[in-house]
Structure formats: C-alpha cells, structure tokens
C-alpha cells in the first residue's frame, strides 16, 4: 500500500462522465435536459440517451437496461452519493439555481465550501446531484501550515441570485456563515 501512495496519479486525469440507471427515461430527460439544459447527443430509442453540455460526446448517460420501472435506491444503502456538475462561473451557477426555482425543484442544501459554492438536490430517481462552481485556486482557504482549509458553511442564496446577468463573477458576495435565505 505504501508503494501506491508514493506515486500519485497524473494531475491531468479527469473523471469523464457518469452513467445512471433510471426508471423512466422520459422523466429523466425532462429533468436533465428540460430543467438543467443538457442536450441529447445520441439516443437509443426508449432505452438510453447520452447528454452533453456543448459538443462533447457525453457528460451524462441515462439508461433503463436494468432499471425500467424500478424503485428508487433505499436510504442508507450503498451506491452513488451524488454526481457533481461543475459550472464554469458563479454566474452560470446562478442560472442553474434560477432554472431549479422555475421548475419548482426543492434543494436539499446549499453550501459554501471555501473552494466552491454548491447546490444539492435530487433527480427524479432520487440520485443526489451537486451543481457547483470552483473559486479560482488563489482564493482557496489555506491554514497557517499551508493545508487546504475547506469548510461547509450555508450558502447565501439571495446573494447568489442577486448577481445580475451582466455582472462579472465575484466571490465576495457570498458571506460564509450567514445562512441560506428563505426563498
């Protein structure tokens, strides 16, 4: 085991896509395409669809091969905790929050982690979904010893929504510890 720790993975490695088993493909597409705005790059009838942000082959794949009409995962069982969708800017995360509000989707939570700001929710199959943006690395919190000091404070949703469409992305609008406002 020590041998594995001595040679870390190449820092250019990325997680490429997530493939989800869903009970109802059309319902899942209404959420991922209709609410979040992903586009279908390929569809295999009523069994599978591949979704992308932009011209990438796919970021999310949905299928019913083993799950058509199946039950949601049981609470307290193993499996996917959440998939995380990284938005390029704070403004794009604001757009995502506005989409969720228009669709009447309830958030499970909203957090400021110092390195990022995140919205947490569930898709129609009760898979956890995190929508987030990363702050620039030079703004990440470090302690006196140089260790990354991530935390989990409530995200000020009113400040996030107050960002106007033409405004540049600014991190100082979110005040850690103020708590999410009732929306």
Image (cartoon, rainbow, N blue to C red):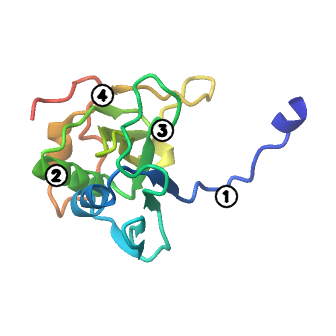
Name the residue tied to disc 2.
98
**What is the spatial separation of the Cα atoms under label 4 and label 2, in whole angstroms?**
21 Å
Q: Earlier in the sequence, mark 1 or mark 2?
A: 1
Q: Quadrant of the C terminus?
A: top left
User: For the residue labelled by badge 3, is the local secondary structure a helix, a strand or a loop?
Assistant: loop
Q: CA distance from mark 3 to mark 4?
A: 13 Å
User: Is residue 129 rendered to the left or right of residue 18?
Assistant: left
Q: Earlier in the sequence, mark 3 or mark 1?
A: 1
Residue 140 is tagged as 3
Observer-nearest residue: 108 or 80?
80
Do the residues bearing badges 1 and 4 touch, measured as CB atoms within 8 Å?
A: no
Camera-nearest label, 4 or 2: 2
Q: CB of mark 1 within 8 Å of CB of mark 2?
A: no
Q: Which of marks 4 and 3 precedes in the sequence?
A: 3
User: In the picture shown, does residue 115 fall above or below 39?
Assistant: above
Cα separation, mark 1 vs mark 4, equals: 31 Å
Q: Position of residue 59 (x, y in %)?
A: 47, 62
Q: Position of residue 52 (x, y in %)?
A: 41, 68
In the image, residue 179 sits, relative to residue 36, either above or below, namely: above
Residue 117, image x, y percentages? 35, 40
Of the numbered discs 3 and 2, the one sitting upstream in the chain is 2
Q: Is residue 169 visible?
A: no
Under tag 1, what secondary structure? loop
Between marks 1 and 2, how big is the CA–CA gap?
Answer: 32 Å
């Amino acid at each position: 085991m020590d041998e594995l720790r001595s040679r870390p993975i190449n820092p250019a490695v990325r997680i490429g896509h997530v493939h989800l088993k869903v009970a109802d493909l059309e319902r899942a597409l209404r959420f991922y395409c209709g609410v979040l705005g992903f586009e279908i790059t390929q569809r295999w009838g009523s069994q599978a669809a591949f979704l992308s942000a932009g011209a990438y082959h796919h970021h999310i794949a949905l299928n019913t091969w083993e799950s058509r009409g199946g039950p949601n995962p049981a609470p307290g069982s193993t499996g996917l905790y959440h998939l995380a969708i990284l938005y390029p800017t704070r403004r794009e995360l604001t757009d995502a929050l506005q989409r969720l509000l228009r669709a009447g989707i309830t958030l499970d939570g909203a957090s400021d982690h110092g390195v990022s700001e995140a919205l947490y929710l569930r898709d129609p199959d009760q898979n956890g979904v995190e929508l987030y943006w990363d702050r620039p690395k030079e703004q990440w919190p470090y302690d006196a010893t140089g260790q990354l000091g991530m935390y989990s404070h409530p995200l000020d949703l009113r400040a996030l929504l107050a960002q106007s469409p033409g405004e540049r992305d600014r991190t100082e609008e979110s005040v850690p510890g103020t708590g999410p406002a009732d929306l």
